[in-house]
Amino acid sequence: MARIVQKFGGTSVATIERIKAAALKVKRERERGHQLTVAVSAMSGATDKLVELTRQASPLHDARESDVVIASGEQVTVGLMALCLQELGIPSRSFCGWQVPIRTNAAHGQARIEELVPDELERMLARGEVPVVAGFQGVTADGRITTLGRGGSDTTAVALAAALKAERCDIYTDVDGVYTSDPRIVTRARKLTRITFEEMLEMASLGAKVLQTRSVELAMNHRVRVQVLSSFAEQIGSDYPGTLLVDEDEIVEKHVVSGVTYSRDEAKITLVKVSDRPGVAAAIFGPLANANVNVDMIVQNVSEDGRATDLTFTVSRSDLDRAVALLNPLVKELGINRIRHDSNVVKVSVIGVGMRSHAGVAQRMFKALGDKGINIEVISTSEIKISILIAEEFTELALRTLHTAYGLDAN
Ligand code: ASP
Ligand code: MG
């Protein structure tokens, strides 16, 4: 007998029919003798509608009240799921975040889980019942409802698995696993049967939207085995049809690069001729940081004459206007000649733990792209990833080229 957390995403609970189908998966796992705890998202599209309503009510809304509204989508689906399970003869009850309780800090809209008290869930499991927990929600020390950021039900599910010491956390979603690249663009992309936590963390934060980044961090820290699998397929989690997140030493088939991802949410800013003196970078990035504008890739050249140099960096597209507005007042003081910006760029990244022990991984990327005439504008690297910025029109070509260059193509 194993203890398993099953999480059903928005598309898997989008209609009563789908909730019934999900409930059947719970039933089938349970018939194999496992102890199940279920976590659910809101019906797909529901949270977007609720966000829009809060915006209409008050554009600069009180985040505490907005959380009350946007958390409500999950209250509907936990109740419906418990009802569907009961219809199948499975004793079940629903829990909102505050009822568990799942305690979080007070960062409304982006709250972090501080403690999940599993006592009541444990009692239910001991009686052979199935608790159904609302994803995405928590409660502060002073009793206010919080939400964990968009996509946060994944994090709830992993937190449940960690607190209950579950053997596995199955994330049922609308894709059947994690792919070597976006299959809509790279038709020869392959489904990975296993991926390391670290690689998944990079993939999640570099554009692959299968799991909320925070949930992968949590899984990595608590060594929770997470499986991503399709809720539309026949097979259930215990058949291992999806992609399993594991430690590096559990990877059998080793590749230097495991995936190629991209993010279109990028904009490039170049400050032409910035004074080359101490304190300048702090004067530029300080105001951006204070305004919560996240800066990603940064390149600065050495100045030829020791007086001025160009500085290029990227921000997310939605922050571009704000960033430029914050930089404009600095033009005079820092001797900036001109501010140029471009949002027709895309960040392409190759990810793989195998890079640590192989030389020439970056060179293979530069050569492959060079051969196709794709110009690289900015480069940044870490131990297990190489990211480049290129013109957006080359996205598809770059992804396919790199997928082939690293030997990832399906036969
Ligand atoms: N319902 C929330 C959202 O749409 C949380 C989730 O689905 O994970 O972001
Ligand atoms: Mg999701």
Image (spheres, rainbow, N blue to C red):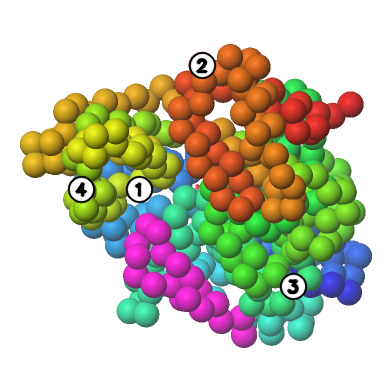
The answer to whether residue 153 of the structure is visible from this angle is no
Q: Which of the two labelled residues, at mark 2 and mark 1, occupies the earlier sequence position?
A: 1
Q: Position of residue 22 (x, y in %)?
A: 73, 50
Residue at coordinates 83% horizontally, 56% vertically from top-left? 251
Dot 2 falls on a residue whose secondary structure is helix
254 or 211, which is in the foreground? 254
Q: Which residue is mark 2?
A: 393
Name which residue type carries label 4: Arg
Q: How many angstroms separate mark 2 from mark 4 (CA)? A: 37 Å
180 or 53, which is in the foreground? 180
Q: Which of the two labelled residues, at mark 2 and mark 3, occupies the earlier sequence position?
A: 3
Disc 3 within 8 angstroms of ligand 1 (CB): no
Check contact, mark 2 vs mark 3: CB within 8 A: no
Name which residue type carries label 3: Ala
Q: Which of the two labelled residues, at mark 2 and mark 4, occupies the earlier sequence position?
A: 4
Q: Position of residue 370 (x, y in %)?
A: 61, 20
Q: Which residue is mark 4?
A: 277
Check contact, mark 2 vs mark 4: CB within 8 A: no
Disc 1 within 8 angstroms of ligand 1 (CB): no
Residue at coordinates 46% horizontally, 60% vertically from top-left? 148
Pointer 1 local density, CA inside 10 Å: few below 14, some 14–19, many at least 20 = some
Q: Which of the two labelled residues, at mark 4 and mark 3, occupies the earlier sequence position?
A: 3
Pointer 2 local density, CA inside 10 Å: few below 14, some 14–19, many at least 20 = few
> What label does residue 96 carry, if any?
none
- Name the front one of labels 2 and 3: 2
Q: Confirm whether the magenta stretch covers residue 117.
A: yes
Disc 2 within 8 angstroms of ligand 2 (CB): no
Instruction: Give the extent of the magenta segment.
Output: 101-119
Q: Which residue is mark 3?
A: 166
> What label does residue 294 carry, if any?
1
Q: Position of residue 74 (x, y in %)?
A: 52, 56
